[in-house]
Image: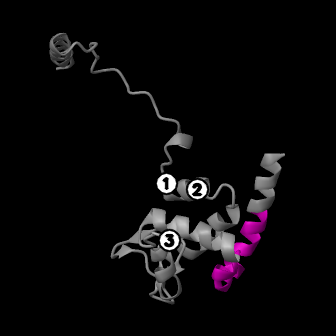
Amino acid sequence: MIETLNGLLLFLSVFNAAPAVSATEVAPMVPVANNPITLEEYVRDYFADSPALAEVAKCESRFRHFDARGVLRGDYDYNDIGVMQINERYHAERAKKLGLDIKTLEGNLVYAKWLYEKEGLQPWASSGKCWKAGATLAVAKSQNMKE
């Protein structure tokens, strides 16, 4: 079977002016740093310059943006949305004015970073017991890596 497939690939490469490829060749692995495989890695990479926000995401959503019903909604307040649990009631209009949709992963992360730059961690204060220790360690680790 493999010999037949290799022969077919060689035959097709002649007509396409492409080099022959063996069916047994393995595609090179893409480095994980350039191709995050989990949402946690993606979020931590996105918030590399503000690691406390990654700790907030861990506590608020356990690094989930979707659940079985669609975009993740808060357990205590249905208006909390996505990986950063941004409250629609307070932030949807402002996010829309900024051209962001907090129901998308990108919009949720971008708005969270914008909000953090304006108000610090105050918008997530209610979950502070969960993320404060991790945020302190994450910031210290981040500063050590820069030195």
Q: Residue at x 43, y 75 (%)?
A: 72
Q: Position of residue 93 (x, y in %)?
A: 47, 82
Residue 147 colored in magenta in the image: no
Is residue 58 visible in the rendered image? The answer is: no
User: Element at badge 1?
Assistant: loop
How packed mark 2 is, by other alpha carbons closer than 10 Å (few <14, some 14-19, many 20 or more), is some
Q: Where does the magenta region start and end?
A: 120-137
Is residue 111 visible in the rendered image? The answer is: yes
Q: Position of residue 27 (x, y in %)?
A: 38, 27
Spatial separation of the CA atoms under disc 2 and disc 1: 12 Å
User: Element at badge 3?
Assistant: loop
Residue identified by numbered label 1: 38
How packed mark 1 is, by other alpha carbons closer than 10 Å (few <14, some 14-19, many 20 or more), is few
Residue identified by numbered label 3: 98
Query: Toward the viewer: 81 or 27?
Result: 81
Q: Position of residue 10 (x, y in %)?
A: 20, 12
